[in-house]
Amino acid sequence: MPCLVDTRSKISHGDELITSVPDKKDSLCQQDDQSQGGDTSTSSGPDLPEDIWCLVHSLMPLCDSAHSACVSRTFLRSWRCHPKLIFTEETLGLKQTEARDFTSRVNQILKNHSDTGVKILKFVIDDHNNVNTCHLNSWLQKAVTPGIEKITLFLPWRSREEYNFPCSILLDGRGNSIWYLDLTNCAFRPMVGFDCLRSLTKLRLYGVCITGDELGRLISNCFALEELQVWCCMELICLTIPFWLQRLSCLTVSECDMLRVIESTAPNLTTLDFFGEPVQLVLRESSKVKDLKVGYSYKPNAVSYAITKLPSIAPHLQTLAIYSSSEKVNTPMVADKFLAIKHLNIHLGEDDDDAVTPTYDYLSLASFLDACPVLESFTLSVDQSDMQHDSVFGDPSLALRQILPHKHERLKKVQIIGFCSAKSMVELTCDILKNATSLESLTLDCIYGAGTGAISDSVRCGPSRSGKCWIRSRAMILEAHKAVGAIKRYILERVPPAVKLNVGGPCSRCQAMDVMLP
């Protein structure tokens, strides 16, 4: 085991005290407890059983565990079945200039470790570490033994098609104790009849080359699976979640560009997060889904899709978050209702290259509120990076529009982050104030991205190292000033006495218009 720091300092415990060991870099402390070198002397310390010292040793960070094994026979014996093997540049004491030493140090560590006792195994290998595939296979073969519980493998992006995870190491009972598996940037090709991972409760695949059939084999016997995350898996076309995954409650699918269908019959799926290209979503028996986040990478009109399609797909939703890069059409009125939604979050125009169209009518979002009869909280976030709209100050002869009478009887909390002087946004706010008869608080934050409800300068807009405000453009400051003016002129007098109004304008550093901005 590498002695990564000067180990001449004394370490004392109930076994013995070693006062002198070699401080040569990368010395391995390979001696067994009968032949360990150095001048040693015993010292009376706490008289604790060896298994207690082994427990203490297992709780140390890897680097400290290695150091203590270099100077203590008890800890050296403990090291040989150390339960946590976490190999990163930090735990190995490596700097980027020493990246070539990654392989040699891992080899040295595993050479002194027995083939038993590993509970947690983690490899974080960066591109500059230049680890050979054969070495990685041998490390996994040695460390993945019966009783292992957590495996994390993080490889550089180039490895996603170059490295095939050796599925065979999970056979013969070695994979049945694993409850956490996290793979990044590799290929995973389970063979037909792959029957392991029966204890797996959390599976995370990021940048993994795996087809829908192969993923089906992987999870076919994961009866304990509770959480599945699939990110940037470009070979997935159809993702099918079988009904026998009785415990699966959380599914995340993000940026799988070739994916066309997500079909689930898992009966207890309650949380679904989806981000990427539009797909066909078939939930069937998974109608218990209560929390849904949906966002499209490039396609517009996610809000319109949600209000027209989701009531029948997920009728029991209680929390819905929609992320739309842009809305090209106004939100339509619909007959179907979200009968259970209590919390609605809509994020518009977060893609700087495709902001909300200037013709989008924010007042049309009132139809979404109408479709949620038990709604209690509503948050609207609008990116102001390329704000274009018809200002409420544009034509003073045009009165604010009002839509047909309707009530949001249970709506208590409303936040608009990125509130602007768009006439239709002012109209939406006035409509909420008029029809939300149970409203308790209204937050209008004129700075997008400052944080939900973070109104104070110290929280929402702290200075950077350069002394400049973080706001991205002078136009953003100008719009924030106009938005504050719109609040004072059109909204303030409409706020009922029982409603708490919170207004977030430009921070104190932005109040002076000559503030320096990039």
Image (tube, rainbow, N blue to C red):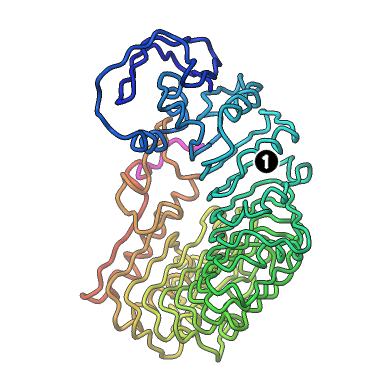
User: Please, what is the dominant secondary structure of the magenta stretch?
Assistant: loop
Q: Is residue 209 left or right of residue 247?
A: right
- In magenta segment, residue 312: no
> Is residue 357 visible in the rendered structure shown here?
no
On the image, which quarter does residue 20 sit in?
A: top left
Q: Residue at x 71, y 66 (%)?
A: 216
**226 or 312, which lies in front?**
226
Q: In which quarter of the view is residue 332 placed?
A: bottom right
The residue carrying mark 1 is 141
* Label 1 element class: helix
Indicate the position of residue 157 as horizontal and vertical percent values.
70, 42
Bounds of the magenta segment: 511-518
Amino acid tagged 1: Gln
Point out the residue furthest to the left here. 497
When asked about the image quadrant of residue 451, the answer is bottom left
Q: Is residue 76 visible?
A: yes
Q: Is residue 430 left or right of residue 158?
A: left
> Could you say where residue 172 lies in the image, as x and y percent from the top left?
67, 53
Q: Residue at x 70, y 56 (%)?
A: 233
Q: Nearer the viewer, residue 302 or 483?
A: 302
Where is 440 relative to 470, above or below? below
Q: In the image, is residue 513 part of the stretch drawn in magenta?
A: yes
Residue occupying the point 78% across, 58% down: 191
Instruction: Estimate the x, y position of residue 436 in percent, counting from the top left.
Output: 34, 81
| Vertical relation: 366 (above or below) 221 | below
Vertical side of 311 occupied by 443: above or below: above
